[in-house]
Image: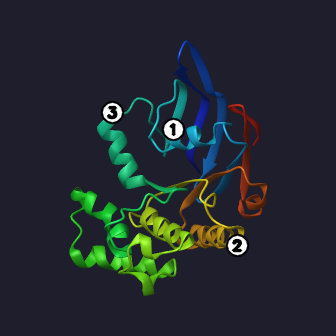
Amino acid sequence: MNIIEIQRVSKDYPLGSTTVHALKDVNFTVEEGDFLSIVGPSGSGKTTMLNIIGCIDHATTGSVKIHGKEITTMTDKQLTDLRLHRIGFIFQTFNLIPVLTVRENVEFPLLLMKKQNFSKKEIRERSEKLISEVGLLDHIEHRPYELSGGQRQRVAIARALVTNPDIVLADEPTANLDSETGEKILELMEELNVVEKTTFIFSTHDPDVLKYAKRTVKIRDGRIVAN
């Protein structure tokens, strides 16, 4: 079953007196539980594609469906709810809150989900389970500055998964890591894809990471060149 359906999506950005065509008539689908890589050189449109799937940016034209629901016509509130409850994000710059501990960073998305009314006990249990799964239980009270780059990325992965999202989007998740640490992060994502049944979509320009993907979509100059 398809969890994401993208049809004839284009994205244009004004740049002074010209227009940048970031995506051009893009079509592809993603199945539930997939571990998909969007690969292409810098500037090819990878991040733009992830931002549109993640409801951070809007397509100029075309259709984007998540769980069969058209997101291009949703209100800002509906998109915010979708991001919060259905989608997790892992950024290459980690985006952790520096004054919070590992535990507090992972718990933070649950505190934003006010409607769910999680008890303190539930929040603690969910965060500790994922912190344990990413191998950081011994660092649970540490702050980001006390962690290595690989450890910070593990915190970001736990935070992305704590709301039990259907989809996790990872934009160049190994870009700021050495090759050995990057491989360990991809192996961890692959393992969590199996254990948590979460759909992972990650972008990369590094051909060495493609061996981890179940499926690869290649993009160049805003167009899908292999799918």
Residue 64 lies, in percent from the top left, at 52, 35
Q: Crowdedness of circle 2 by 10 Å Cα count: few (<14), some, many (20+)? A: few
Horizontal relation, residue 166 to residue 170: left or right: left
Disc 1 to disc 3, C-alpha distance: 14 Å
Residue plotted at (72% across, 31% down): 221
- Mark 2 or mark 3, earlier in chain: 3
Frontmost residue, 73 versus 136: 136
- Mark 1 or mark 3, earlier in chain: 1
Q: Which residue is mark 2?
A: 180
Horizontal relation, residue 185 to residue 155: left or right: right
Q: Which secondary structure lies at badge 1?
A: helix
Q: Return the mark for residue 74.
A: none
Q: Is residue 103 above or below residue 225?
A: below
Q: Which residue is mark 3?
A: 75
Frontmost residue, 219 versus 92: 92
Residue 58 lies, in percent from the top left, at 47, 31
Three-letter residue code for mark 2 = Glu
- Residue at the far front: name it: 145
Residue plotted at (71% across, 49% down): 205
Q: Quadrant of residue 11?
A: top right
In the image, which is nearer the foreground, mark 2 or mark 3? 2
- Mark 2 or mark 1, earlier in chain: 1
Q: Is residue 181 above or below residue 138?
A: above
Q: Return the mark for residue 52.
A: 1
Residue plotted at (41% across, 62% down): 96
Residue 132 lies, in percent from the top left, at 46, 82
Q: Crowdedness of circle 1 by 10 Å Cα count: few (<14), some, many (20+)? A: some
